[in-house]
Image (cartoon, coloured by chain):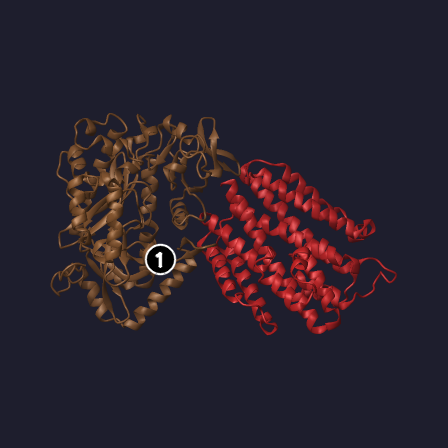
Amino acid sequence: MLGRTAGQIFWMHRYLERSEYNARLVDAGFRIALTRTDAAAEEWASLVATSGVRDQYLERYDTFDGANVINFLIRDTSNPSSVISMVKSARENARHVRASLTREVWEAVNNCWMTLQKLLARPIREAELPGVLDVIRKQSAQGRGALHGTMLRNDIFDFARLGTFLERADNTARILDVKYYVLLPSASFVGSSLDNVQWETILRSVSAMRSYRWLHRGNATPLGIADFLIMDGRLPRSLAFCYEKIVDNLGYLAKDYGERHPCHELAADIRRQFHEETIETLFDAGLHEFLVRFLRENAALGAQIEKDYRFHE
Amino acid sequence: MSGDDRPFDEMLGAGDAVRDPYRPYNDWFQGEDIRRLRKKARESEAYFRSTGITFNVYGNNEATERLIPFDIVPRIISGREWWRLVKGIEQRVRAINAFLYDIYHRQEILRAGRIPVELIANNAAFVPQMMGVDPPGGIYTHIVGVDLVRTGEDQFYVLEDNTRTPSGVSYMLEDRETMLQMFPELFTRNAVRPVSDYPLELHRSLSSCAPPRAGDNPVVAILTPGLYNSAYYEHSFLADQMGAELVEGSDLRLVDGRIAMRTTRGYTPVDVLYRRIDDDFLDPLTFRPDSLLGVPGVMDVYRAGGITLANAPGAGIADDKAVYSYMPEIVQFYTGERAILQNVPTWRCGEPESLKYVLDHLAELVVKEVHGSGGYGMLVGPAATRRTLKEFAERLRRHPGNYIAQPTLSLSTVPILGRAGLESRHVDLRPFVQVSPDRIHVTPGGLTRVALKKGSLVVNSSQGGGTKDTWVLDD
């Protein structure tokens, strides 16, 4: 397949993953605004930071007010990471690589764009938000279903998955990094319960509220949450899970092409720490330092994949 | 429309009895509820949108995607009618390839004085860099779209020979696909010849024109100017259906004397490039130096026989409107036969007597710019205001050589589904022809363009035209 095509498929899936993530951030923020009005502004501010668009936001608005944040993260076309911008870019990439997608995948992405374009033509009123988020969730699920149900398991699929998991790992690490201060060891560290608002935001943003409750019976400790999101290979948005998948998909490519590249070593190195470290050793060495390093390594792996598989000239 | 002559209606003919090819369709239609059909028509639009069968239009700032309206009433051609058209098209396309070979080699036709030397020498569509070049397989026009119009039971005229990069074939295929999905019952009542093997036939036909070194499985790629080109959908559709790579200029480069595409596993040579970009943009080293769409060095590789370009650069000289007017002579010269398909009588305004005639009869004629396309820069005399006629006459006097004129043909009509039922609209027909060293293949069907506005003769999609599924019956 063409290097450019591989790159466009890879990025198409990064865009889709990020659009979903942004929708979940808004969902988390909205829940908190409804239940804890005093903490709302601070939460909205941290969500904008998590989405990586704080500067762009502050160019437009002075305060982190719910309605503005919601519209900025979901439907503002001047925000390159908004849901609508991401879906538009994903759909444009899909048009580029149509011949590499099944009809079902193309139609899912195209219909997602057509639906959201219509739905988000006007500012979102508070009362409509749950409905809007629901549509976004369903549209994303359709795209994912089409991908899994209809695509051949070949190099095209591998590049799609690599895009998804690199972006997902980036997003999970980002929310942890923005919130790491609430997870920091403090005087009442061991066994202390976290402020509900904080852990709810974290867990909702990776859609892991229920699974965490199943596993921990509602006992939210900093260590428990960090362990879940970083080390637990069962959680589909944990860093460990993403890296199992990344290493797998790179492995399929190596097998298919009969050729290994520097990106394979890089990915294996990153994954190794999830096997060799424990959440305790990570905390001891510094959670923030770990997350900053991880984000850097994850980005470097993305760049290495682009190079090794000739996405660009 | 001039006078009271009613145009030939392909469903009703001259009288009011339904013509044979339309009978089974008409029987079915009479039993249908118009409201159900109108609902179906609306559904077809949703289908086109979701499939993304759109063309790009450039407005003031952002490119928008539009649909070409699709009409659900098929245009039906009998097997007998089709057989005659095919004979005529094959003859014409054979002559065009022989003409192109000759023009870029010994130019016998000029030596014989059958067409004037200036016609070629001063023509922007003539590409001197092609002199003496032998395209692989000897084919210049691998894909041709011959535009035909009909004026009566047996009267067909060629309006244009599109020998550069004719588009619209995706509509031929998607219109059929849509009809099969919406009205499967029609295809059990009518023996409609299939068009769906076009992409595979095209792959086969292009592969058979590959350079000798390509081996048994030549690599075929489609070169597109990119996402923002108005025909992008068609490029990606064809790549998908043919199993060919869809490449852009930036994916290709010269590697070890061949043109290769950048893949995830390194550079792979391309044997046949079906290019959907104009000659001018093909190679910045040979043609426009500012082109970013093409591939530097592709012409050198081509001249050395290292790649097939479809269609060959310079093939456009054969569909130049001034050259068109000599097509009967060209067919005669190279095939030794009279042309089966008629040309529309054409006045070359560069000739003083013709100019005088054209100026005297401007209100009855259609005047076209020699290098224009897409219905722009064109005058439809009978539909023009007095003022427009006057302005056009001025332009004609100033640059007579830039124009040709033709009588306003009374284009045949085919019904469309209107508000109250069937309404007649003017149509044309573009069958698609594939040329390979061993055969000329005309797909039984084509693109029927229909002027949706009542009485209008302009079928171009950019000016209110739509499309219809075109049936060729197996009779």
Inspect the image, locate mark 1, and give the three-letter code of the amino acid beneath it.
Ile
Q: Does any portion of residue B264 appear in the rendered image?
A: yes
Q: Nearer the viewer, residue A10 or B361?
A: B361
Crowd band around label 1 with a 10 angstrom C-alpha radius: few (<14), some (14–19), many (20+): many
Q: Residue furthest left?
A: B15
Work out whether residue A120 or residue A223 is closer to the camera in this orientation and state it.
A120
On screen, residue A274 versus residue A111, left or right, reads right
Residue B33 drawn at (x, y percent): 27, 73
Horizontal and vertical percent position of residue A271: 69, 46
- With B374 as the anchor, is B89 left or right in this view? left
Q: Quadrant of the N terminus of chain B?
A: bottom left
Q: Residue B253 or B450: which is nearer the viewer?
A: B450
Q: Residue at x 16, y 44 (%)?
A: B356
- Secondary structure beneath dot 1 equals loop
Lateral position of residue B223 relative to residue B103, left or right:
right
- Residue at the right extreme, as displayed: A187
Q: Chain coloured red: which letter?
A: A
Residue at x-position 33% and y-position 67%: B40
The residue labelled by disc 1 is B68
Above-or-below relation of B303 to B35: above
Q: Is residue B146 visible in this depiction of the protein?
A: no
Give the brown chain's letter.
B
Chain assignment, label 1: B
Residue A261 falls in image quadrant: top right
Image position, residue B3 (x, y; %): 14, 60
Instruction: Estimate the x, y position of residue B288 in percent, counting from the top left.
Output: 42, 35
